[in-house]
Amino acid sequence: MPAHQTVFVIDDDEAARESLTFLLRTEGMTSRAFSSARAFLDQLHKDQHGCIITDVRMPEMDGITLVNTLAEIGCTMPIIVITGHADVPLAVQAMKAGVADFIEKPFESEALVGAVRLCLETAHVRSVDEDRRASITRRRDTLTEREAQVLALVVDGLSNKEIANNLGISFRTVEIYRAHVMSKMQADSLSDLVRMTISIAA
């Protein structure tokens, strides 16, 4: 598990919080505990990475409301919902809202740890992908207006001659702009350039 990842445990039951954080730490995971959804949200910032474990039944803001709130603010950390047997319909609702997993009480330690490890791996892959797309976007933003026009036409599949006719410039000028685009985007090939552009347009 990458060192910067944290498992955020949210439960109003102090004994449950302490038990969960102890379990996670014995498995070598960094964890932080919060007694309420609001306390967690108050400290949440975009540079945090990892996953979230939340109970369903909590005062003020329950687990389902927390899940929906996190979705609204664009938090992409995977979420595990812990639920009692009577709360299974709520847990299913949470799954439909995008949570990664729900685990019924009482649960086996191995089941929870396995779910957390899977979530952390998912979060890591997602974080790497987000960083890659952000880097591509920064490179694209260095293009001049004309270079951006050439990029768009290249990605649309136009030849240099077609691009020249479309923009009213010479074939040689298109070649120069295209070379600048490849260099600034750090693309090794045309297919690489197309993949980059598609990834940030998705």
Image: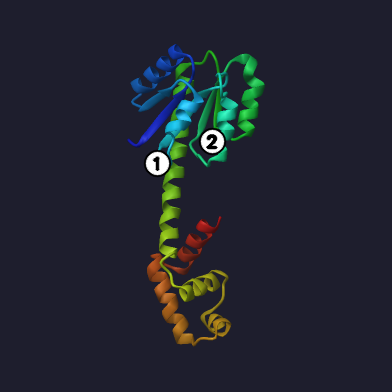
Going by the numbered disc 2, the residue's amino acid type is Leu
Is 60 situated left or right of 51 in this image? right
Measured in 3D between alpha carbons, the distance from the residue under mark 1 to the one under mark 2, in whole angstroms, is: 14 Å
Looking at the rendered image, the quarter that the C terminus falls into is bottom right
Q: Mark 1 is on which residue type?
A: Asp
Q: Are marks 1 and 2 in contact (CB under 8 Å)?
A: no
Residue 70 bears which disc, if any? 2
State whether residue 6 is above or below residue 156. Answer: above
Residue drawn 46% across the image and 44% down it: 126
Residue 115 in view, yes or no? no
Q: Image quarter for residue 33?
A: top left
**On the rendered image, what quadrant is the N terminus found in?**
top left
Residue located beneath label 1 in the image: 47
Q: Picture coordinates of residue 77 (x, y %)?
A: 48, 36
Label 1: which secondary element: loop
10 Å crowding of disc 1: few (<14), some (14-19), many (20+): few
Which residue shows up at 50% across the image and 61% down it?
195
Tag 2: Cα neighbours inside 10 Å, few (<14), some, or many (≥20)?
some
